[in-house]
Image (spheres, grey):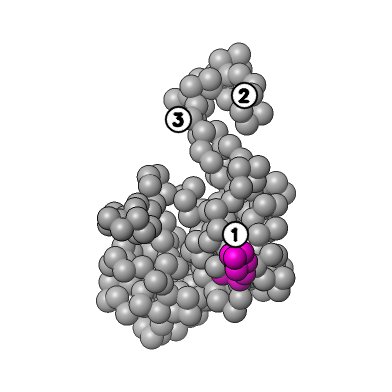
Amino acid sequence: MTDKKKTGLELLREPFPANQISKLPKPTTAQTDAVKRDFKAGIRCKLCGAWHHPDAIHLDYVGHAALTDRLLDCDPNWNWEPVTMDLENGRPKFDPLGGMWIKLTVCNATRLGYGHAGDKKGGDAIKEVIGDALRNAAMRFGAALDLWHKGELHVEDDDGNRAAENKPDSQADRVGASNAKQPLDITADLEKIKTITDVDELDAYYKAVRETTPELVKIPDFIDACKAQKALIVATSKGDTYNATI
């Protein structure tokens, strides 16, 4: 009997085949500085094709094209949108760090994601931000989750069935894991709130979190941080009226 073909969000969680997994070099700061000082200290890597320090490690990742192909297989009508828009210029709004929060919708379910291009500049950096944000948001749905996790994500129980490890996945990068059984670690969220310098952007961020991770907006520390940041933004602006109701 042939197994039923997986579709929708169930398909999104399927592991990616080896031919769709790429290698990303992750040199240390010291290694990067060494190559900057002396170009010949680097090598043309046969594994990833990039020029970097010979001792740099590599991480497995799924590229933009492979992820897009999987999203289309899961839901031809999938879509993403920025959490905040630059209404004056009619384009997505980046945060003070150069990153962007997005909402990814697949099969009528929505998750938050964040993308950043590191030190890259220009048009390539914008594309890098979008691709990074899509991978980050898709991870909330379980896409390439085994590549994000640094150990065995599942183990076999005594009956031979696959069971999740007791150790939770890293929570420092979590915003939209609404089905997590472990208490939410909101450290990253509190740091994100501190970077927002616009009232409308803060309101949009709060609303997006409320839609995708409703349990997060019930945490007093998260609510207090939003209110405090809103008060700070208003206090440093002219002509605005402070409204403590997020």
- Give the CA distance from mark 3 to mark 2: 16 Å
Asked if marks 1 and 3 touch (Cβ < 8 Å), the reply is no
Considering only order in the chain, which callout, 3 or 1, is on the residue closer to the N terminus?
3
Q: Which residues are magenta?
A: 1-9
Question: As rendered, which of 64 and 98 lies closer to the eye?
Answer: 64
Q: Secondary structure at mark 3?
A: loop
Residue that appears at 50% across and 26% down: 56
Percent position (x, y) of residue 138? 55, 61
- Where's the C terminus, which quadrant? bottom left
Considering only order in the chain, which callout, 1 or 2, is on the residue closer to the N terminus?
2
Q: Which mark is residue 28?
A: 3
Looking at the image, is mark 1 or mark 3 nearer the viewer?
Answer: 1
Left or right, 113 with reference to 70: left
Q: Which mark is residue 134?
A: 1
Considering only order in the chain, which callout, 2 or 3, is on the residue closer to the N terminus?
3
- Kindly give the residue lying farthest to the front in the view shown: 1
Percent position (x, y) of residue 75? 67, 71
As displayed, is residue 122 above or below residue 10? above
Mark 2 is surrounded, within 10 Å at the Cα level, by few (under 14), some (14 to 19) or many (20 or more) other residues, namely some
Q: What amino acid type is highlighted by mark number 1?
A: Leu
SS majority, magenta: loop
Q: Secondary structure at mark 1?
A: helix
Question: As rendered, which of 67 and 243 lies closer to the eye?
Answer: 67
To which quarter of the image does residue 69 belong? Answer: bottom right
Q: Is residue 19 magenta?
A: no
Location of mark 2 (residue): 45
Residue that appears at 38% across and 57% down: 162
